[in-house]
Image (cartoon, rainbow, N blue to C red):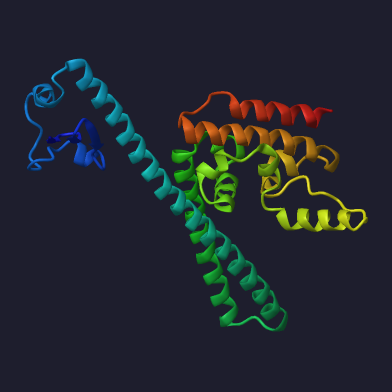
Amino acid sequence: MKYNLWFGIVEDGSVKKAKNLKEMFRTAENQSPLPFNILEFGLKVFRDEKEYYRILRKIAIEVAEEEVNRELRREDRYVITLVKALESLNETINVLNEKLEDIREVKESEITEMFQRDISKLRELRRAVEKEIESVMEKIAPNLSEVARPIIAAKLLEKVGSLEKLARLPASKIQILGAEKSLYKALARIKRGRRAKIPKHGIIFQHPFIRTLPKSKRGKMARFLAAKIAIAAKIDYFRGELEEGLAEVVKNRYEELRRK
């Protein structure tokens, strides 16, 4: 027998859960508000209160998780789009700056002033895009944002395609994200019996804790940072809660290397 309950459809002992939270909190029969006594409504099917609440809890958790994952995927795509826009803005600003310098070498004119105004507007837009990236990343990946910094974290996410994929990567892979071409070239040279320098870092080199250290210490810091980024991404994806002290551990390691 088939029953339309407020949290899904029950037929021949199996339950087809509601598609989303909004559907879950409406009765499937007529889309009217919930009946006053929802337990009584459920017991018409399950006959047993313990079984009713077991099924209800299971479905509520599954539907809530799907809602969270759906929202997370949407925010992932938004951040990735913003990062690509930021990269295009940086390229455009750099090109226009070069052209502005070329023009200035020849002559100061009204065109030069127009170039300057447009470059200033693009810089304002870049700041706005960066601020939005930071806001979204701090919401969907607080630990990653704390450890790697929001913009770097967003670039890592854009590189792999989603927070889920980043959370499943080993630290060794995270360490060289963005330096794949250099790595493949180095490996190809090694296979041919030639000497080659294996890259120690990719995108994460932009982190001040790496680029401000002497070259001899950057590799150690990159490995340590990549390991903590891997942990942060996993916490953000699987738990979604801020882990106090994780970023402080990274800072302490940086200070330790800087003093040596």
**Foreground pick, 260 / 123:** 260
Q: On the image, which quarter does residue 65 sit in? A: top left
What residue appears at the point 62 percent right and 26 percent down from the top-left corner?
A: 248
Which quarter of the rendered picture does the C terminus lie within? top right
Q: Residue at x 50, y 34 (%)?
A: 236
| Percent position of residue 66, x then y | 35, 39
Give left or right: position of 208 versus 38.
right
Looking at the picture, tell me which residue is in the foreground, 149 or 66.
Answer: 66
Residue 229 in which image quadrant:
top right
Is 32 above or below relative to 133?
above
- Relative image position of residue 113 (x, y in whole percent): 57, 76
Q: Toward the viewer: 55 or 173?
A: 55
The foreground one among 161 and 226 is 161
Residue 235's place in the image compared with 195, above or below, is above
Left or right of residue 175, residue 124 in this image: left
Position of 241 with respect to 115 (left or right) is left
| Residue 151 on image: x %, y % | 56, 47
Tally the marks: 0
Residue 199: image x %, image y %? 79, 49
| Residue at horizontal 55 percent and vertical 48 percent from the top | 157
> As drawn, is 26 to the left or to the right of 191?
left
- Decide: is 20 above or below 255: below
Residue 140, picture quadrant: top left
Q: Quarter holding the N terminus?
A: top left
Residue at 57% of width from left, 71% of height from top? 116
